[in-house]
Image (spheres, rainbow, N blue to C red):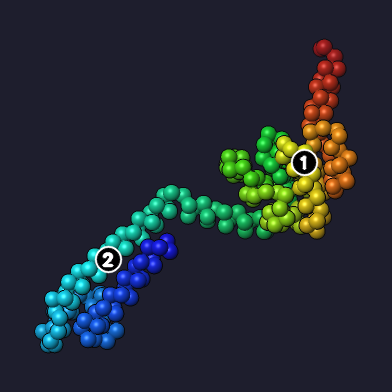
């Protein structure tokens, strides 16, 4: 909006100054000519001066105002129907809701693991804030109705935006053990009192994750393997 509005204002200012010089009138009267160009005829009936040039100038100024006004209108329509204004309003509303959240759970990453965790928590009535850097996953989290912060969960400012200082738990659910461990380190330095649960892909990462500040470490492959084993051990009936 800055460019078309800037052009419109520039045309108004230039028009007023031009009228003042051509008609040898004050700025107030020149501004009135911008609104009512027919006043130019009345002026030159009583005063000598470059009437023809002033009228030609009036045509140029009027065309400029019309075109810049259309540009402003087109920009507004494009922003509205292009979804950018509604997106920004939605983002601002979501940020306000996150700032008002307390005792929530932060889920970093909205892949299959993170999505399952977030949805189950939401079904149980828990407030959830999702942090996701991937645009497609972020849109999926938004469609699922979760509060969302788009960004890298390894950045302290992103964690603070998600309300890490007010959250009760933080789940590092990304499908990358190293990234999840980095999240645990950063969240520990963010003066957070939240319990940190870290997902890792291999047992060799468990001790590293705990040293990084994880309160609990989950290995999905081990958990799912144990569940399958329990199912296999059930009696045939």
Q: Position of residue 231 (x, y in %)?
A: 81, 20
Label 2–label 1 contact, CB within 8 A: no
Q: Which residue is mark 2?
A: 64
The answer to which image quadrant residue 11 occupies is bottom left
Residue situated in front as seen by the camera: 8 or 88: 8
**In the displayed structure image, the side of residue 43 where residue 86 appears, left or right:** right
Mark closer to the chain start, 2 or 1: 2
Mark 2 and mark 1: Cα distance apart in space: 58 Å
Residue situated in front as seen by the camera: 174 or 122: 174
- Dot 2, crowdedness within 10 Å: few (<14), some or many (≥20)? some
**In the displayed structure image, the side of residue 76 where residue 11 appears, left or right:** left
- For image coordinates 79% across by 44% down, the residue present is 181
**In the displayed structure image, the side of residue 156 where residue 142 appears, left or right:** left
Image vertical order of residue 97 relative to residue 46, above or below: above
Q: Which residue is mark 1?
A: 178
- For image coordinates 51% across by 51% down, the residue present is 87
* Residue 219 shows in this picture: yes
The answer to which image quadrant residue 156 occupies is bottom right
**In the displayed structure image, the side of residue 120 where residue 12 appears, left or right:** left
Q: Residue furthest top?
A: 236
* Mark 1 residue element: helix
In the image, which disc is placed on residue 107?
Answer: none
Image vertical order of residue 175 relative to residue 57, above or below: above
Of the 4 image quadrants, the one containing the C terminus is top right
Q: Position of residue 192 (x, y in %)?
A: 80, 56
* Mark 2 residue element: helix
* Residue 144 shows in this picture: no
């Amino acid at each position: 909006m800055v460019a078309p509005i800037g052009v419109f204002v520039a045309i108004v200012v230039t028009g007023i100054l031009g009228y003042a010089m051509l008609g040898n009138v004050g700025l107030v009267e020149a501004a009135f000519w911008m609104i009512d160009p027919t006043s130019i005829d009345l002026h030159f009936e009583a005063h000598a001066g470059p009437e023809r040039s002033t009228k030609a100038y009036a045509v140029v100024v009027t065309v400029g105002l019309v075109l810049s006004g259309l540009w402003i209108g087109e920009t507004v329509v494009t922003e509205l129907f292009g979804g950018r204004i509604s997106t920004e309003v939605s983002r601002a509303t979501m940020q306000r809701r996150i700032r008002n959240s307390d005792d929530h759970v932060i889920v970093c990453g909205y892949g299959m693991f993170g999505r399952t965790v977030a949805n189950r928590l939401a079904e149980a009535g828990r407030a959830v804030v999702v942090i996701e850097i991937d645009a497609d996953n972020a849109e999926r989290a938004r469609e699922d109705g979760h509060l969302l912060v788009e960004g890298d969960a390894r950045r302290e400012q992103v964690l603070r935006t998600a309300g890490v200082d007010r959250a009760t738990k933080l789940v590092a659910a990304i499908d990358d053990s190293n990234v999840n461990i980095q999240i645990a380190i950063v969240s520990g330095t963010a003066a957070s009192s939240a319990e940190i649960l870290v997902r890792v892909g291999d047992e060799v990462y468990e001790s590293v994750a705990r040293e990084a500040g994880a309160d609990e470490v989950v290995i999905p492959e081990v958990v799912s393997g144990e569940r399958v084993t329990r199912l296999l051990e059930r009696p045939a009936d």
